[in-house]
Image (cartoon, grey):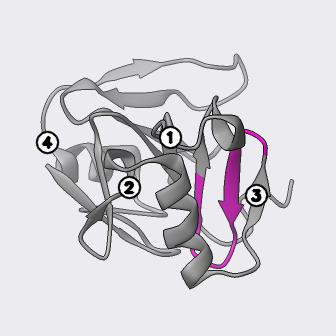
Amino acid sequence: MKFEIHSHEGAGPIRFGMTADEAREAIGGEFKSVQKHADSHPTDVFGEFECMVFYDDDGRVEAIEFVEPGRAMLGGVDLLGMSYADLVKLITEQDPEVMIENDGFTSEKLGIGSYAPGGIGEPEDPAETVIVFPPGYYDG
């Protein structure tokens, strides 16, 4: 399944603010809930789609993360199917204020971030993850 990113709204059929049940129904397929922290809502891992859905303390979708070969799409372009250098170029064209670090980037404007272990040092390697998030997600 391709998950077209809708900045600050969600990806594919998943929308920020959905309950866990609504998100699970929207995606379909099997999932496994993983408790990452004792005091947080479990994260749903949809192995078939290589995506994880994170929930806030109220059990509502607060972020979606994809790993290769997951299909996180932006404007029809597969973000995990390109080199990190090309991914940074694509995002920078849409958000000149993107925060680029050695191992990834965060675009508050687009609500998209990425982790790339090789990052700047290995620009031809693809990113390892793409995360989609709503406004304020990283505000603490």
Residue 59 appears anywhere in the view: yes
| Foreground: disc 1 or disc 4 | 1
Rendered residue at 30%/76% (across/down): 75
Q: What element does badge 2 sit on?
A: helix
Q: How far, Cα to Cα, is label 3 from label 4?
A: 34 Å
Rendered residue at 48%/36% (across/down): 125
Label ID, residue 79? 2
Query: Where residue 95 sits: x, y (%)?
Result: 64, 80
| Foreground: disc 2 or disc 4 | 2
Label ID, residue 84? none
Label ID, residue 28? 4
Identify residue for label 3: 100
Which range is magenta? 102-113
Query: Where residue 92 sits: x, y (%)?
Result: 62, 74
Question: Which tag, 1 or 2, sits closer to the chain's start?
Answer: 2
Look at the picture and state if 119 lies above or below 73. Answer: above
Crowd class of label 1 (few under 14; some 14 to 19; many from 20; radius 10 Å): many
